[in-house]
Image (cartoon, rainbow, N blue to C red):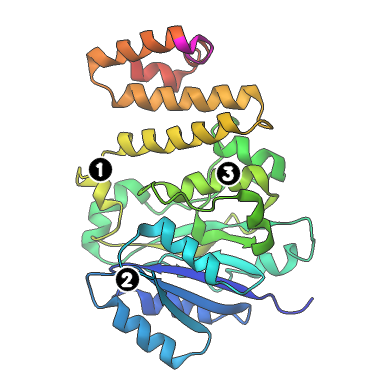
Amino acid sequence: MTTMKISVIIPVYNAEKYITQAVESALQFEETYEIILIEDKSPDNALEVCRKLAENNPRIKLYQHPDKRNHGAGATRNLGIEKATGDFIAFLDADDYYCPNRFDAEKELFKNPEVEGVYGAIGVHYYSEKAKEQYYSIFKDHLTTVYKKHDPEYVFPGLLNMRGSFGLFSLDGLTIRKSALTKVNTIFKTHLRLHQDTEFIFRLSYYTNLYPGIIDQAVAMRGVHENNRITQVDSGKIKPSISRVLLWREVNKWAQSENSISEDIKTHIKRMLRSFEIANASAPKKWAIISKYLVTDFHSIRSGLYNINFRKHLF
């Protein structure tokens, strides 16, 4: 097999301290055909750092949105995919970095044309003691991974929490054939400011054949620092429950419009949405929501009452 041509897409926002490490971690692989930096109107000096990186290496390509404004991670990754010329797409956040084994599994698995995507495990790196103190309770030292190897048809229901303890994977550990992205229609939903990556992975796992790569050790590291995007959630600017309601509303909207999705899965997705809507509601509104859906969506509520994760939000 000839060397893979992988386009590594890195959205850049407020990451002048970290982007060089991210880029260098991707440059170590001969499979990295190009690194596409999409600078998203950073308030720091990230644009100038990116310019110097691009000037010094022909594999690094720098772009901005046509209007030079900030558009968020979803639109920025979409632009990166549009600009990519490699046969495969990999993603990397600007404050994260790849491990030396990042594409070891891909080099073998993609020899099979039926393999449309490969996912691996992600580790955690704390950039400071303050960051570790602030976020250790969230990330600890755990791998973000699917707990055991599954055939592609089990990935979608597994990620939806329909198969018990399944686990999950993130964009940093995902490599996808660019040709397979045509199956997904809309790539990243730009109106979702949070969880647009999760929503994309749900749809991707439904439409394409995703295979496990290295899931028992990290192929990339999530960089945790005081200015991570997750601080928007923890600081109270965006409540976690609200962001999850918006996520599951989007997933439900898509699922109900997709005729090939089974009714069991559609009901499960409705139940997940109802669960987060109830969790986010004040005490009086909880029962108003339940009463509403007992009339309009009795089957979903009834099935939810048999689920402990659903019931715990009622009180």
Q: In which quarter of the view is residue 12 placed?
A: bottom left
> Could you tell me the amino acid type at mark 3?
Arg
Taking the magenta stretch, the answer to whether it contains residue 298 is yes
Return the residue at label 2.
68
Q: Where is residue 169 in the image (x, y as percent from the top left)?
A: 53, 50
Magenta stretch secondary structure, dominant = helix
Residues 3 and 7: in front is: 7
Magenta stretch, residue numbers: 296-301
Q: Give the mark, 3 or 2, whose residue is nearer the N terminus.
A: 2
Return the residue at label 3.
203
Residues 64 and 227: in front is: 64
Q: Where is residue 77 in the image (x, y as percent from the top left)?
A: 46, 62
Image position of 117 with respect to 89: above or below: above
10 Å neighbourhood of mark 2: few (<14), some, or many (≥20)?
few
Q: Describe residue 59's horizontal placement relative to residue 239 as left or right.
A: right
> Could you tell me the amino acid type at mark 1?
Ile
Residue 80 visible to an observer of this rendering: yes
Image position of 282 with respect to 146: above or below: above
Residues 11 and 224: in front is: 11
Distance of mark 3 from mark 2, alpha carbons? 29 Å
Return the residue at label 1.
238
**Helix, strand or loop at mark 3:** helix
State which mark lies toward you, 3 or 2.
2
